[in-house]
Image: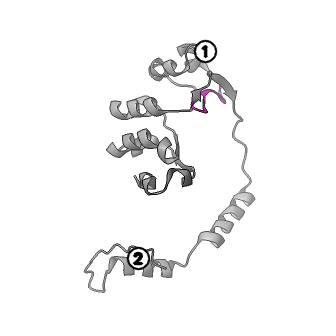
């Protein structure tokens, strides 16, 4: 819901904000329907992914498919294909959705407010990673974003006002602790 706080920012000054939700079904609260309905207005660009439609309650499913702009679908099961085919007809059939080859997908895009004709795409198989590059990325991240554990622990204690006896008086600072 924090994204909706962008209402305080004049529309012409809002910049795109990207939110990626993998295993989307784990984030399906009552507020997600509102977020899906209001996303474009607040320049919230959502990418949501999940394994199958049965994971979603009807209300959430309707909110997703009622507000989706662009959509990509890899191979799916018969039950999902029965529902999803409506998004890709008349170009692709239910059988197309069930039988698409590995590393292929069907897509449709929202371009300038208009939905494109459905089309197929070919993706690449996963590449073997280089452990050295992964380690360099971790070290770079630690150097740039990492903080001393003792300092972080101290900030947490200051924010929560936990004293030595374990009493607790939670506070919520109006500004981040520096």
Position of 111 with respect to 154 (left or right) is: right
Quadrant in the rendering for residue 25:
top left
Rendered image coloring scheme: one colour
The percent position of residue 157, horizontal first and vertical second, equals 38, 80
Res 132 seen here: yes
Q: Which residue is found at the position 43% from the left and 29% from the top?
A: 66
Marks 1 and 2 close (CB-CB < 8 Å):
no
Tag shown at residue 53: none
Is residue 69 placed above or below 168 in the rendered structure? above
Q: Which residue is found at the position 69% from the left and 33% from the top?
A: 123
Which residue is at the front of the view, 116 or 161? 116
Position of 91 with respect to 165 (left or right) is: right
Where is mark 2, residue-wise?
A: 156
Q: Secondary structure at mark 2?
A: helix
The percent position of residue 149, horizontal first and vertical second, equals 51, 78
Q: Earlier in the sequence, mark 1 or mark 2?
A: 1
Q: Secondary structure at mark 1?
A: loop
Give, as a single range, the part of the protein colored magenta: 102-113
Where is mark 1, residue-wise?
A: 91
Q: Which residue is found at the position 34% from the left and 76% from the top?
A: 160
Is 104 part of what is drawn in magenta? yes
């Amino acid at each position: 819901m924090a994204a909706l706080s962008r209402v305080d920012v004049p529309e012409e000054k809002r910049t795109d904000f990207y939110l990626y939700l993998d295993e989307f079904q784990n984030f399906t609260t009552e507020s997600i329907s509102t977020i899906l309905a209001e996303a474009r207005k607040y320049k919230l660009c959502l990418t949501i992914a999940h394994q199958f439609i049965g994971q979603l309650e009807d209300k959430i499913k309707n909110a997703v498919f009622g507000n989706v702009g662009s959509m990509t679908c890899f191979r799916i099961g018969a039950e999902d294909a029965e529902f999803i085919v409506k998004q890709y007809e008349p170009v692709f059939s239910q059988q197309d959705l069930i039988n698409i080859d590995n590393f292929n997908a069907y897509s449709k895009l929202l371009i300038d407010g208009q939905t494109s004709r459905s089309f197929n795409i070919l993706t690449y198989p996963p590449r073997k990673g280089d452990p050295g590059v992964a380690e360099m990325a971790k070290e770079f991240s630690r150097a740039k974003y990492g903080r001393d554990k003792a300092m972080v622990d101290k900030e947490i204690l200051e924010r929560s006002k936990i004293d030595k006896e374990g009493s607790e008086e939670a506070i919520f600072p109006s500004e981040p602790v520096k």
